Amino acid sequence: MNEGPGELKCRRHFFTSWMEQMGYKSTCAEDSVAVARKLIKSGCRLEGVPGFFVNRNGDWEIAFYKKNSGYLCPVWSGEGLLTAFQIRLDVPYQKRKYVWLSSAKLNKGCSPGSSVSLSGDQDVGRVFVTEGILKAENTHQRSGETYIGNPGVMNHKELRQLLAQMKERGLREVVEANDMDKLMRLDCREDYGTVCRICSVKGPQCPKKREKREQIRKKCLKLYEICGELSLSLSRATWDTDEEGMWQGQYKVIDDWELREPEDFCGKAAA
């Protein structure tokens, strides 16, 4: 795949414009009331819509604050309905990069739940499942493949429901595309961030790496169980691996791999 600077610039501009059309935009706390007023004026009813509430002045408002400032990531259902938003935070809060746009416990507000998101055509024979909404959409736009973004560890019910719906429409194969932490080497090299400074465990294996790898593998195992229950074929996508099949440590998530620059195209993700 060879692209010149002009082609790369054009592709990135198209990609950004399309993402904005899909609802991926930055939040703005100053416009929280104005957004609600604009929707009401256009005929929308905001009661029961996650993220909206009635403020102290009696006005409808969307829950945009400085603390949850970031990038809106829309959650789309299999039927193409917008069901919720996640926010990719500008500044992570308590080690969390993503939070739900929620108005739970506020006047006439409600919770968004914890849905999975579909990026691409619902009527396909194969679907990829990865860990987040934004990375699912990124990778779908790059590859053309249909992706399910599963934002939470506990979203198994919603994931199973969507896969069951898609099976009725012809789905036969699922590809697990969770982060490559699942094949991370556990060698203690004091290279796992700031936790290494305070770690008191000295040994051949890093306990934090082991914990992270087990978390990812548990997600994978649950997906295997669901596919077994639904009699769906399941395979695993891997990328950036060495000759022993272990992760080399450069491209952790599937959208990093798919969106790498042309000069980095030295291999192909294999399922």
Image: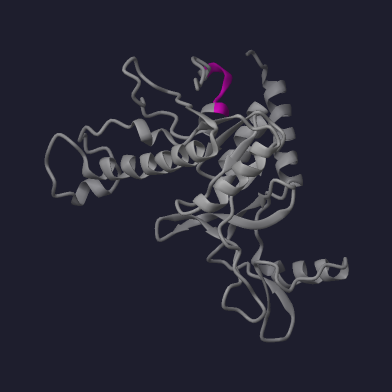
Q: Which of 111 and 30 is in front in this view?
A: 111
Residue 81, horizontal then vertical, whole percent: 74, 52
Quadrant location of the N terminus?
top right
Q: Measuring 45% from the left and 30% from the top, which residue is drawn there?
A: 251
Residue 203, horizontal then vertical, whole percent: 12, 38
Tell whether position 152 is magenta: no
- Decide if residue 170 is in sight here: yes
Seen in the picture, residue 123 relative to 151 is either above or below; the reply is above
Seen in the picture, residue 155 relative to 5 is either above or below; the reply is below
Residue 19, horizontal then vertical, whole percent: 70, 42
Kindly indicate the quadrant of the structure image that contains residue 142.
top right
Tell whether position 259 is magenta: yes
Seen in the picture, residue 124 relative to 67 is either above or below; the reply is above
- Decide if residue 119 is in sight here: no
- Check the image and name the residue furthest to the right: 42
Q: Which of 36 and 49 is in front in this view?
A: 49
Q: Measuring 61% from the left and 71% from the top, which residue is drawn there?
A: 103
Instruction: Give the number of marks.
Output: 0
Q: Measuring 73% from the left and 46% from the top, which residue is drawn there?
A: 22
Q: How is the image coloured?
A: one colour
- Check the image and name the residue furthest to the bottom: 57
Is residue 33 found left or right of 235 in the rendered image?
right
Residue 45, horizontal then vertical, whole percent: 80, 70
Q: Measuring 69% from the left and 36% from the top, which residue is drawn there?
A: 120
Magenta range? 258-263
Is residue 122 found left or right of 178 in the rendered image?
right
